Amino acid sequence: KRGSHGGATGTSDSRILPGCHLIRQLRLDELPQLINILRGEMSWIGPRPVSLEIARKCEAASPVYTARYLVLPGITGWAQIQYGYAGSVEQELEKLEYDLYYLKRISLDLDLEITFRTLRVLATGHGAR
Protein backbone atom coordinates (compact mmCIF):
# COMPACT_ATOMS: atom_id res chain seq x y z
CA LYS A 1 0.00 0.00 0.00
CA ARG A 2 1.16 3.52 -0.73
CA GLY A 3 2.78 5.11 2.28
CA SER A 4 3.04 1.96 4.34
CA HIS A 5 6.85 2.02 4.31
CA GLY A 6 7.60 5.59 5.35
CA GLY A 7 6.42 7.28 2.17
CA ALA A 8 3.62 9.76 1.61
CA THR A 9 0.39 9.13 3.47
CA GLY A 10 -2.49 8.25 1.16
CA THR A 11 -6.20 8.57 1.81
CA SER A 12 -6.54 4.83 2.45
CA ASP A 13 -3.20 4.44 4.21
CA SER A 14 -3.14 1.58 6.72
CA ARG A 15 -1.24 3.81 9.19
CA ILE A 16 -4.33 5.98 9.70
CA LEU A 17 -6.24 4.49 12.59
CA PRO A 18 -9.94 3.83 12.07
CA GLY A 19 -11.99 6.82 13.16
CA CYS A 20 -9.03 9.21 13.05
CA HIS A 21 -9.79 10.78 9.67
CA LEU A 22 -11.50 13.71 11.43
CA ILE A 23 -8.36 14.34 13.50
CA ARG A 24 -6.34 14.55 10.28
CA GLN A 25 -8.95 16.67 8.53
CA LEU A 26 -8.93 19.19 11.39
CA ARG A 27 -5.12 19.06 11.37
CA LEU A 28 -5.04 18.09 15.05
CA ASP A 29 -2.41 15.49 14.17
CA GLU A 30 0.00 18.44 13.76
CA LEU A 31 -0.19 19.46 17.44
CA PRO A 32 2.71 17.24 18.59
CA GLN A 33 4.97 19.22 16.25
CA LEU A 34 4.60 22.16 18.62
CA ILE A 35 7.09 20.32 20.83
CA ASN A 36 9.57 20.39 17.95
CA ILE A 37 9.05 24.16 17.65
CA LEU A 38 9.68 24.64 21.37
CA ARG A 39 12.87 22.57 21.08
CA GLY A 40 14.06 24.75 18.19
CA GLU A 41 13.99 21.83 15.74
CA MET A 42 11.16 23.28 13.63
CA SER A 43 9.62 26.60 12.78
CA TRP A 44 6.03 27.66 12.21
CA ILE A 45 6.88 28.46 8.59
CA GLY A 46 9.37 26.75 6.34
CA PRO A 47 9.66 23.86 3.93
CA ARG A 48 7.46 21.03 5.15
CA PRO A 49 9.53 18.00 6.23
CA VAL A 50 9.05 14.78 4.30
CA SER A 51 9.91 11.20 5.14
CA LEU A 52 13.54 10.17 4.89
CA GLU A 53 12.67 7.80 2.05
CA ILE A 54 11.10 10.55 -0.04
CA ALA A 55 13.85 13.05 0.82
CA ARG A 56 16.56 10.64 -0.37
CA LYS A 57 14.73 9.99 -3.64
CA CYS A 58 14.24 13.73 -4.21
CA GLU A 59 17.91 14.46 -3.45
CA ALA A 60 18.97 11.81 -5.98
CA ALA A 61 16.62 13.22 -8.62
CA SER A 62 17.46 16.89 -7.98
CA PRO A 63 20.58 17.89 -6.02
CA VAL A 64 19.08 21.38 -5.48
CA TYR A 65 16.53 19.68 -3.21
CA THR A 66 19.05 20.00 -0.35
CA ALA A 67 18.61 23.80 -0.45
CA ARG A 68 15.44 23.20 1.60
CA TYR A 69 17.71 22.35 4.53
CA LEU A 70 19.07 25.92 4.72
CA VAL A 71 16.16 26.87 6.98
CA LEU A 72 14.30 24.99 9.68
CA PRO A 73 11.42 22.84 8.47
CA GLY A 74 8.00 24.29 9.16
CA ILE A 75 4.50 23.21 10.03
CA THR A 76 3.27 25.26 7.09
CA GLY A 77 4.96 26.90 4.16
CA TRP A 78 4.62 28.48 0.75
CA ALA A 79 4.58 25.09 -0.98
CA GLN A 80 1.75 23.86 1.25
CA ILE A 81 -0.55 26.78 0.56
CA GLN A 82 0.32 27.02 -3.14
CA TYR A 83 0.57 23.34 -4.08
CA GLY A 84 -0.94 21.34 -1.27
CA TYR A 85 -0.36 17.67 -0.70
CA ALA A 86 2.28 15.77 -2.66
CA GLY A 87 1.63 12.05 -2.92
CA SER A 88 4.68 11.08 -4.98
CA VAL A 89 8.33 11.96 -5.50
CA GLU A 90 7.40 13.64 -8.78
CA GLN A 91 4.85 15.85 -7.04
CA GLU A 92 7.33 16.57 -4.24
CA LEU A 93 9.81 17.78 -6.86
CA GLU A 94 7.10 20.06 -8.29
CA LYS A 95 6.57 21.45 -4.77
CA LEU A 96 10.31 22.09 -4.58
CA GLU A 97 9.85 25.08 -6.88
CA TYR A 98 7.61 26.70 -4.25
CA ASP A 99 10.11 25.96 -1.49
CA LEU A 100 12.87 27.55 -3.57
CA TYR A 101 10.64 30.57 -4.18
CA TYR A 102 10.22 30.90 -0.41
CA LEU A 103 13.96 30.57 0.22
CA LYS A 104 14.75 33.30 -2.32
CA ARG A 105 12.11 35.70 -0.98
CA ILE A 106 12.00 34.91 2.73
CA SER A 107 10.62 37.90 4.60
CA LEU A 108 8.22 38.92 7.34
CA ASP A 109 5.67 39.93 4.69
CA LEU A 110 5.79 36.52 3.03
CA ASP A 111 5.60 34.75 6.41
CA LEU A 112 2.52 36.81 7.29
CA GLU A 113 0.89 35.96 3.97
CA ILE A 114 1.60 32.26 4.54
CA THR A 115 0.18 32.52 8.06
CA PHE A 116 -3.06 34.15 6.91
CA ARG A 117 -3.51 31.73 4.02
CA THR A 118 -2.88 28.80 6.36
CA LEU A 119 -5.50 30.11 8.78
CA ARG A 120 -7.94 30.38 5.88
CA VAL A 121 -7.26 26.74 4.93
CA LEU A 122 -7.83 25.71 8.55
CA ALA A 123 -11.06 27.68 8.78
CA THR A 124 -12.52 26.49 5.48
CA GLY A 125 -11.10 22.97 5.37
CA HIS A 126 -9.98 23.61 1.79
CA GLY A 127 -7.05 21.30 1.12
CA ALA A 128 -7.64 19.10 4.17
CA ARG A 129 -6.94 15.39 3.67
Image (cartoon, rainbow, N blue to C red):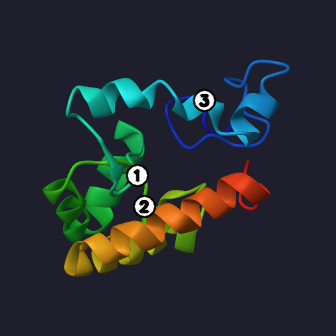
Q: CA distance from mark 3 to mark 1?
A: 14 Å
Q: Position of residue 121 (x, y in %)?
A: 67, 60
Q: CA distance from mark 1 to mark 2?
A: 6 Å
Please say whether residue 80 is visible from this viewpoint.
no
Which mark, by number, is residue 29? Answer: 3
Q: Position of residue 50 (x, y in %)?
A: 41, 45
Residue 118 is left or right of residue 78, and the answer is right
Q: Quadrant of residue 8?
A: top right
Q: Amino acid at mark 1?
A: Arg
Q: Which residue is mark 2?
A: 77
Seen at 40% across and 75% down, the residue is: 98
Q: Which residue is mark 1?
A: 48
Disc 3 residue crowd, few under 14, some 14–19, many 20+, Cα 10 Å? few
Please say whether residue 60 is visible from this viewpoint.
yes
Q: CA distance from mark 2 to mark 3?
A: 17 Å
The residue mark sitting in front, 3 or 1, is 3
- In the displayed structure, 17 sits above or below 104; it is above
Q: Earlier in the sequence, mark 1 or mark 2?
A: 1
The residue mark sitting in front, 1 or 2, is 2
Q: Amino acid at mark 2?
A: Gly
- In the displayed structure, 44 sits above or below 16; it is below
Q: Earlier in the sequence, mark 3 or mark 1?
A: 3
| Tag 1–tag 2 contact (CB < 8 Å) | yes
Q: Amino acid at mark 3?
A: Asp
